[in-house]
Amino acid sequence: MAKTAARNPPSEVQNLQGNHACALAAVAAGCRFYAGYPITPSSEIAERMSLELPKVDGVFIQMEDEIASMGAVLGASLGGVKAMTATSGPGFSLKQENLGYGVMAEIPCVVVDVMRGGPSTGMPTRPSQGDVMQARWGTHGDHELIVLAPASVAEVYEQTVRAFNLAERLRTPVIVLIDEVIGHLVETVAIPDPSELDIWHRKWAEGKREAYLPYAAGEDRVPAMARPGDGFRAHTTGLTHGENGFPTQEPEAVERAILRLLEKFERHREVIESTEELETGDTEVLVVAYGISARAARRAVREARAQGIKAGLFRPITMWPFPEAALARAAERAERILVPEMNAGQIVLEVERIVGRARVRGINRIDGEAVTPADILARIAEEA
């Protein structure tokens, strides 16, 4: 697998919106195709990509809808190009069928979802974290997905680059899940020169063309892709298929194919998982939070510590696969675990599954407003 070597030129410091950071990071990571449809609050990503891609001989296309956008991205990736699309809740729903096709056919790509209030058209301009479970289970069947949740503009840049690297390395769609606040937040960010970045590229087929099987994989469980024009014959389908790429309903072959799809994520957990912890060594009240809610939680934890309360923060940056072992370790000493979310309770279910329901309490807002440090601090004080 090819990897671009890093050098160390100076970073460029600029005031940057989260959505713009996502676009710049995608181009720096090698994205050369973007297909999308405007939708609040993600439209700035498409707008910036329409300006940046022509500078690097890339292609930007506004499609007729989100279904076509996702299909175009998959086609571009199969054609050998790093590709991305961005959307919000209703558009994310429309992408799910083709997202499942990408999972089954193992097509690397990046999908950005800037979350807004729902269900349906909901509140286009108000923040929410209501797509967390949809990101994991929006498409049907037994599958894994990588979902990354940045909590700052700088992290939007970092995790977008990482999303492309993971997509290429594991031959899978990767979702970057941003809440509206982070997407529209403007912060001062040091943007690295693209030559500073560690960039991964997909594994291309080599060797004898007649012996090539498009879905045969080695120990890493990731098959090599056929580069268009290289003469390696590949059949691509969303139907369950064998190593030759052709559909099969033979039970042993089906089980082998699905298990390999699941195993490739388990084999690479150390690369996929990313978390942040604050003051978890002696914590009695642990806050588990992500996105903008984690920023409020960080402030609340620090204020609680100043008041003598042993509070701590566990932040999953990789939302899916959920970092189960890391959370279990961080929660070992905690008597209470609080999960602030801008939804009616989604990741709280995952936390309960891992550490037990008795210790876990949710802090929820579904009114289009962000969870505040004061909301979390008050609950920490109650539970201490």
Image (spheres, helix red, strand yellow):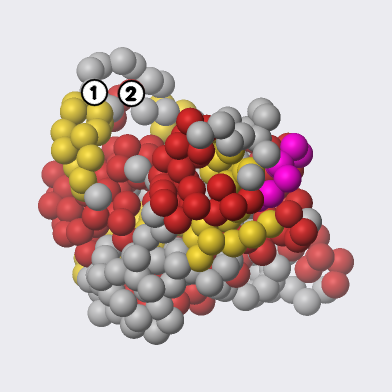
- Across and down, in percent, residue 36 comes to 28, 67
- Residue drawn 27% across and 63% down? 42
SS state under label 2:
helix
Residue drawn at 40 percent across, 66 percent down: 128
Point out residue 357 in the picture as x, y percentages from the top left corner: 75, 60
Name the residue nearer the viewer: 37 or 217. 37
Report the mark closest to the observer, 2 or 1.
Answer: 1
Residue in the foreground of this view, choosing between 57 and 130: 130
Residue most extreme to the bottom: 120
Q: Is residue 187 visible?
A: yes
Give the residue type at disc 2: Glu
Q: Going from the N terminus, do you reach mark 2 or mark 1 first?
A: 1
Please provide percent x and percent y for residue 29: 35, 39
Which residue appears farthest toward the right when viewing the image?
252
Quarter holding the N terminus? top right
Q: Is residue 58 left or right of residue 6?
A: left
Q: Could you tell me the amino acid type at mark 1?
A: Ser
Against 11, is 326 above or below?
below
Q: Is residue 173 above or below residue 163?
A: below
Residue 237 visible in this rendered orientation of the protein: no
Quickly name the residue at label 1. 11
The answer to whether the residue labelled 2 contacts the one labelled 1, judged by CB atoms less than 8 Å apart, is yes
Quadrant housing the C terminus: top right
Say few, some or many: other residues with alpha carbon within 10 Å of mark 2 (under 14 / 14 to 19 / 20 or more): some
The segment highlighted magenta reads: 331-337
Rendering quarter of residue 35: bottom left
Q: Is residue 252 magenta?
A: no
In the rendered view, tell whether residue 214 sits above or below residue 166. Answer: below
Give the residue drawn at x 50%, y 65%.
364
Image coords of residue 352 (percent x, y): 72, 59
Q: Which mark is residue 196?
A: 2
Q: What's the magenta bit mostly, secondary-structure-wise?
A: loop
